[in-house]
Amino acid sequence: MGLQKINGLRKTLTKAWIFPYFIGHWVLSWFGPKVLGGGAGDIPFYLSMLLVAILAIIRMIWALKVTVPDGQVTDYFSAMDRDGIEL
């Protein structure tokens, strides 16, 4: 039972990066330049573009760190090949 809880938590954590993704973009849109669709104008255009890039890099690194390990992905594809499943 304990192992199932750990695996369930691991599966949840692999998806947790999506919440900062939406929240971060919402905040940047809210305070961003009016030119890009109605933001408050508190953040200048070029600074908002830099912040979007930084946020994207941080999320990408986080998503890659919590994703399925390479060995496990190889095992999945090997099993699919063995069972004749095509993508």
Image: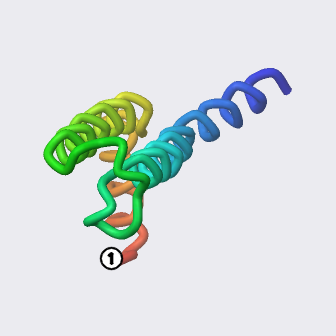
- What residue lies at 81% left-to-right and 21% top-to-bottom? 2
Image vertical order of residue 4 relative to residue 83, above or below: above
Count of numbered labels shown in the rendering = 1
- What residue lies at 41% left-to-right and 38% top-to-bottom? 67
Q: Mark 1 points at which residue?
A: 87
- Amino acid type for the residue under numbered disc 1: Leu
- Left of 34 or right of it: where is 26? right
- Left of 4 or right of it: where is 52? left
Image vertical order of residue 34 relative to residue 15, above or below: below
Q: Quadrant of residue 62?
A: top left
Residue closer to the observer: 81 or 13:
13
Q: Quadrant of residue 63?
A: top left
At mark 1, the secondary structure is loop
Quadrant position of the C terminus in the picture: bottom left
Point out residue 19 in the picture as x, y percentages from the top left corner.
56, 44
Image vertical order of residue 85 relative to residue 44, above or below: below
- What residue lies at 30% left-to-right and 55% top-to-bottom? 33
Dot 1 crowding, Cα within 10 Å, few <14, some 14–19, many 20+: few
Point out residue 61 in the picture as x, y percentages from the top left corner.
29, 32
Residue closer to the observer: 9 or 47:
47
Residue closer to the observer: 57 or 15:
57
Image vertical order of residue 6 relative to residue 80, above or below: above
